[in-house]
Image (tube, helix red, strand yellow):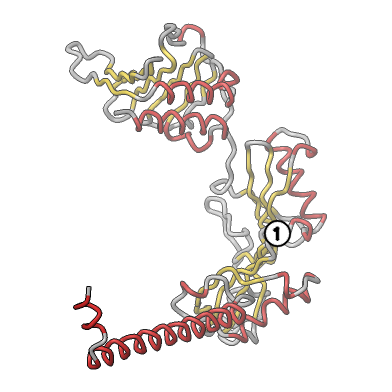
């Protein structure tokens, strides 16, 4: 111990020890100053940018301040909304193909390339899409995702009447879920019929989406609704089911079987049967395979089986009991799926899957996910 005390009080070592202490103090002080400066800079950056662009830190090109300032002001004038209530949630650089920023009124556009921006502005309840030039002095409102309140009454009435007739539902059961102003590029509202001649003129109008339960229809109209066309590709209208004849129904399930899928057709023309048992086994065989060479046995957990059973009940699988959703006329090489639970049987085909009722699509998806998870 004496040696250690003497050693500490050696003059040369005392000077070294003192220098080390002073160096440590200075290092800590410098770190505190740097942290303070960094914190102040972060606060200043957030304050300056919070009202401009939420996603500025992940964009390769910074949005010019004049553009960022112009949009809330324009939207405030149009909608009577305080500029503090709106913010730019997304933006991308664009090169517009004309002086109207690709949002023309008839016969008004110069044919020149215009660099600019496409931006999405939001007040957390509604989104608006803008096209602008590079400095924000020229800007146009492209669309809003919930502008049905601005939809002219004549357009609203025309669309609802057309949808009511097509879906065989009263207007009271239909809802306009989206209405966007559009400028169509031709007199056919960009939905020409076969061999139809369309006048090459810009037509101001609307794109209107109507919901009727599980069915959705998309219409293109002119400004007044006197011309309208159904966009069949964008619409989702479930098929009309037919009753499966009793003679064509598969055998009912045994008590220990929860679910069964029979697939047949396609290019190979083979038929496979997959059954889910209560103990979690998933057994797949090919019908007509004399050697049973294609049999496979996999497993899911008993908990997964029970969850799937509850899901079938909540999804009301029984409402599709003994119904078939047929393939379009003239279709070929499609696969027909026959699904059977303890509640009944339903039949559909792969090329009509997207036109099934939404709840049935959900059941098909849940079954496919369960089968894919088996090991």
Image quadrant of residue 9?
Answer: bottom left
Looking at the image, residue 57 lies above or below residue 296: below
Looking at the image, residue 356 lies above or below residue 241: below
Give me the residue at 43% from left, 20% from top.
Answer: 338
Query: Who is closer to the viewer here, 316 or 267?
Result: 316
Looking at the image, residue 198 lies above or below residue 195: below
Quadrant placement of the C terminus: top left
Give me the residue at 29% from left, 23% from top.
Answer: 298
Residue furthest front in the image = 2
Looking at the image, residue 82 lies above or below residue 357: below
Label count reads 1
**What residue is shown with label 1?**
125
Query: Who is closer to the viewer here, 159 or 195?
Result: 159
Q: Secondary structure at mark 1?
A: loop
Q: Position of residue 83 (x, y in %)?
A: 73, 75
Q: Position of residue 239 (x, y in %)?
A: 56, 31
């Amino acid at each position: 111990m004496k040696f250690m005390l003497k050693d500490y009080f050696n003059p040369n070592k005392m000077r070294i020890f003192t220098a080390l202490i002073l160096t440590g103090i200075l290092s800590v002080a410098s770190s505190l100053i740097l942290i303070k400066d960094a914190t102040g800079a972060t606060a200043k950056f957030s304050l300056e940018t919070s009202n401009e662009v939420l996603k500025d830190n992940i964009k390769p090109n910074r949005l010019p301040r004049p553009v960022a300032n112009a949009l809330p002001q324009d939207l405030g004038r149009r909608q009577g909304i305080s500029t503090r209530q709106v913010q730019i949630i997304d933006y991308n650089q664009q090169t517009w193909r004309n002086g109207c920023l690709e949002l023309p009124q008839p016969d008004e556009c110069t044919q020149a390339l215009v660099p600019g921006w496409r931006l999405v502005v939001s007040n957390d309840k509604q989104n608006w899409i803008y096209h602008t030039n590079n400095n924000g002095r020229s800007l146009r409102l492209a669309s809003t995702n919930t502008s049905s309140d601005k939809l002219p009454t004549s357009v609203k009435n025309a669309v609802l009447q057309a949808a009511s007739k097509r879906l065989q539902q009263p207007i009271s059961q239909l809802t306009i879920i989206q209405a966007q102003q559009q400028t169509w590029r031709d007199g056919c509202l960009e939905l020409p019929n076969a061999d139809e001649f369309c006048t090459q003129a810009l037509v101001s109008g609307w794109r209107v989406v109507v919901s009727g339960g599980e069915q959705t229809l998309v219409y293109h109209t002119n400004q007044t609704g006197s011309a309208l066309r159904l966009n069949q590709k964008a619409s989702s209208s479930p098929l009309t089911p037919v009753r499966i004849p009793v003679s064509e129904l598969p055998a009912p399930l045994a008590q220990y079987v929860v679910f069964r899928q029979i697939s047949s057709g396609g290019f190979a023309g083979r038929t496979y049967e997959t059954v889910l048992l209560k103990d979690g086994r998933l057994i797949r065989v090919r019908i007509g395979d004399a050697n049973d060479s294609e049999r496979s046995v996999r497993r899911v957990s008993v908990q997964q089986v029970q969850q799937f059973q509850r899901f079938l009940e909540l999804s009301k699988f029984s409402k599709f009991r003994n119904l078939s959703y047929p393939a379009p006329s003239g279709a070929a090489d499609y696969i027909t799926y026959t699904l059977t639970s303890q509640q009944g049987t339903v039949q559909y085909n792969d090329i009509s899957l997207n036109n099934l009722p939404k709840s049935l699509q959900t059941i098909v998806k849940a079954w496919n996910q369960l089968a894919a998870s088996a090991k």
